[in-house]
Image: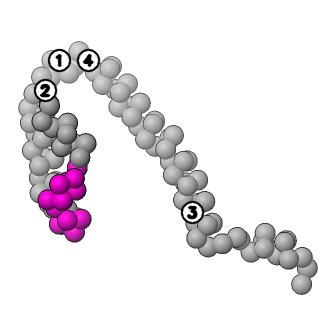
Amino acid sequence: MCVLLPQVLCGPHMLAVLSPDANDQMWLAQDVCLAIIALAAGSQLRWAEFKENMHTVLCLCAGVFICTWCVRSPLVYEFHRRCSRLAHGPDTASARKQRGPS
């Protein structure tokens, strides 16, 4: 754990070992490593223990779902709407209202 924490905090760009382009091209290696980690974590599960804690697991999954989709989605939508308005300028209705009748 003590070895992983600095690596997680620093990321791949801290020592300039990987360029941003090289980091983008390593998606396959990253996906394979993630699959191996998931397989190792799954091998540690015991079905009997999992069934005993099913209520806790379901509550945690529901909490993650609610936080991810129901809380974050409106925030992302509002952020996208504001950025879109800044990129495209004021909409035509408010611009006409400010100019007055033609």
Q: Measuring 54% from the left and 59% from the top, which residue is drawn there? A: 80
Q: Classify 10 Å Cα crowding around label 3: few (below 14), some (14-19), many (20 and above).
A: few
Task: Give the Cα separation between the discs numbered 3 and 2.
Answer: 44 Å
Task: Give the Cα separation between the discs numbered 2 and 1.
Answer: 8 Å
Tell me: 36 left or right of 69: left
* Quadrant of the frame with the N terminus: top left
Q: Which residue is mark 3?
A: 83
- Identified by mark 2, the residue type is Leu
Q: Measuring 74% from the left and 75% from the top, which residue is drawn there? A: 92
Q: Measuring 23% from the left and 46% from the top, which residue is drawn there? A: 10
Q: Where in the figure is residue 98, as x and y percent of width and height?
A: 84, 72
Q: Classify 10 Å Cα crowding around label 4: few (below 14), some (14-19), many (20 and above).
A: few
Can see residue 27? Answer: no
Mark drawn on residue 49: 1
Residue furthest front in the image: 15
For the record, the magenta segment spans 11-22
Helix or strand or loop: what does disc 2 sit on? loop
